[in-house]
Amino acid sequence: MGWVSSGREDQARIRAQSAVSSALEKLPAAEAGQRTWDRLREQLDEPAVERIARITGALSESQRLIAELQAEVDTKLAAVERLRAEEEQNRQLAAMREEEAEAVRRLLRTTIESAHDELRAGLEHERDDLRVRLQELQSALDGMRESSRKDQIRFFVYGVGVSIPIGILINIFV
């Protein structure tokens, strides 16, 4: 069935066109508005079958664009899912690495503590050895002092014992 318009609709359309036309002429962008209005007027003047065909073409084009957009969205969603899976895998690896790092820290701590204990035991043993040696040296030194005093007294007595007879002999012969 074709498009049929009544006389009233035509008059209303003409009045609306003239009102819009006069309003557009008063705007600063009246020239752009006039071009738009001219296009609208051409569209109103074109037959309904042509408009329907043009609209159908536009709908077909929009369906094609929607299908392209949907394909693009699906591709991006797949990429997002891959990234999420990769992120989860990276988190698991990070957790495993954290566990490995903690194990290494514990191993190092244990190794360092055992080495520290060994060093401490070795140092204590050496300190004990040094104390024993020091005591031995102190005893030897005390013994040497005592023998040195005895030697000094002995030399004094020998000196006195020898020098008096020599002095007497010198006095006799001189």
Image (cartoon, rainbow, N blue to C red):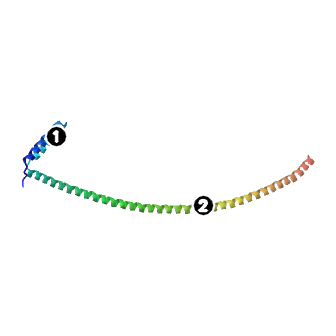
Looking at the rendered image, the disc whose residue lies closer to the viewer, 2 or 1, is 1
For numbered disc 1, what is the local secondary structure?
helix
Q: Is residue 49 above or below residue 98?
A: above
The image quarter containing residue 32 is top left
Q: Do the residues under discs 2 and 1 have CB atoms within 8 angstroms?
A: no
User: Where 12 sits versus 114, above or below?
Assistant: above
Of residues 66 and 52, the one drawn nearer to the viewer in this rendering: 52
Decide if residue 133 is on the left or right side of residue 116: right
- The residue where tag 2 is placed is 120
Q: Amino acid at mark 1?
A: Gly
Query: Which quadrant of the figure has residue 19?
Result: top left
Q: Residue at x 42, y 61 (%)?
A: 97
For residue 61, side relative to residue 102 (left or right): left
- Disc 2 secondary structure class: helix
Q: Position of residue 114 (x, y in %)?
A: 55, 63
Q: Which residue is mark 1?
A: 33
Q: Position of residue 128 (x, y in %)?
A: 66, 61
